[in-house]
């Protein structure tokens, strides 16, 4: 970690502690080494530095829409300092895919939010299949890491109140499709199986598009043990 990364880490650790009362005991379940694809829900921007700083010292590279990474402002600069992987929305971004696979091959962690955009209300949106492509090409395990309770953080900030933010970590698994041809339909089916694992970790009111789904049915997910 460079000096500037360390300074930013300490700054965001302190800032997010002022914003949130973090219930992060479950984050101890995140493996301390080895390649890992973390699949997380996406509600608001502040959840990102909150998670990053609490997974330290593990190196983690998030995948963020390219416009934010390339913005000539403080946000874009911070994202670049932490090695964020820019993803061009609306297209198959092979450069982002290769960078993610290389990061995993180096034994590091990649953070992806399969929803692709913020929900604002905390309810899960339909997952996008890009994470499945990376998982199949890299062979890396996936780990669901979800959070809830942050949807009203901005209102609480205006009232100078901290927001309770809870993290829940699931069990790691790998994707397998045997000899099946990986069609767009199959990719979406596997994505939905991944999203159901995330939904099962959340209180019912946050399950959104996956409310009522059965997380026990996952023919293409392989759990250890």
Image (spheres, helix red, strand yellow):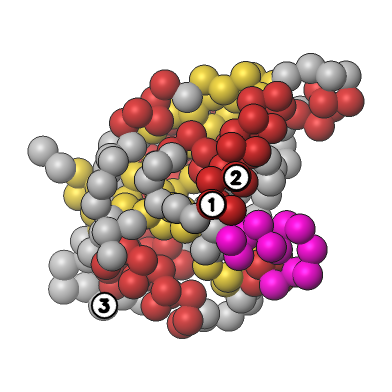
Question: Mark number for residue 7?
Answer: 2
The spot of residue 194 in percent (x, y) is 38, 49
Q: Disc 3 and disc 1: Cα gap in Å?
A: 47 Å
Identified at 81% across, 22% down, the residue is: 156
Q: In this view, does 86 lie to the left or right of 129?
A: right
Q: Which residue lies furthest to the left in this view?
A: 225
Question: Mark number for residue 181?
Answer: 3
Identified at 64% across, 71% down, the residue is: 66
Q: In this view, does 212 lie to the left or right of 123?
A: left
Q: Nearer the viewer, residue 56 or 30?
A: 56
Q: Is mark 3 on a helix, strand or loop?
A: loop
Are discs 1 and 2 less than 8 Å apart at CB? Answer: yes
Are discs 3 and 2 less than 8 Å apart at CB? Answer: no
Identified at 75% across, 29% down, the residue is: 153
Q: Give the range drawn in magenta.
A: 70-81
Q: Which of 121 and 34 is in front in this view?
A: 34
Q: What element carries label 1?
A: helix
């Amino acid at each position: 970690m460079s000096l500037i990364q360390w300074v930013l880490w300490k700054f965001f650790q302190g800032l997010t502690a002022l914003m949130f009362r973090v219930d992060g005991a479950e984050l101890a379940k995140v493996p301390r080494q080895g390649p890992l694809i973390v699949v997380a829900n996406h509600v608001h921007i502040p959840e990102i530095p909150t998670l990053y700083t609490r997974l330290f010292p593990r190196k983690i590279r998030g995948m963020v829409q390219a416009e934010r990474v390339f913005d000539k402002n403080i946000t874009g600069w911070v994202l670049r300092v932490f090695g964020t992987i820019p993803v061009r929305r609306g297209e198959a971004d092979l450069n982002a895919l290769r960078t993610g696979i290389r990061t995993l091959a180096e034994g590091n962690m990649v953070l992806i939010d399969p929803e692709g955009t913020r929900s604002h209300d905390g309810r899960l949106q339909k997952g996008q299949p890009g994470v499945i492509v990376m998982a199949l090409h890299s062979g890396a395990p996936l780990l669901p890491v979800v959070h809830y309770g942050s949807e009203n953080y901005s209102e609480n900030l205006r009232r100078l109140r901290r927001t309770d933010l809870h993290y829940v970590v699931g069990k790691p698994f790998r994707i397998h499709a045997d000899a099946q041809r990986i069609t767009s339909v199959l990719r979406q089916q596997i994505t939905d199986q991944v999203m159901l694992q995330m939904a099962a970790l959340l209180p019912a009111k946050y399950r959104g598009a996956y409310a009522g789904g059965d997380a026990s049915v996952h023919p293409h997910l392989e759990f250890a043990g």
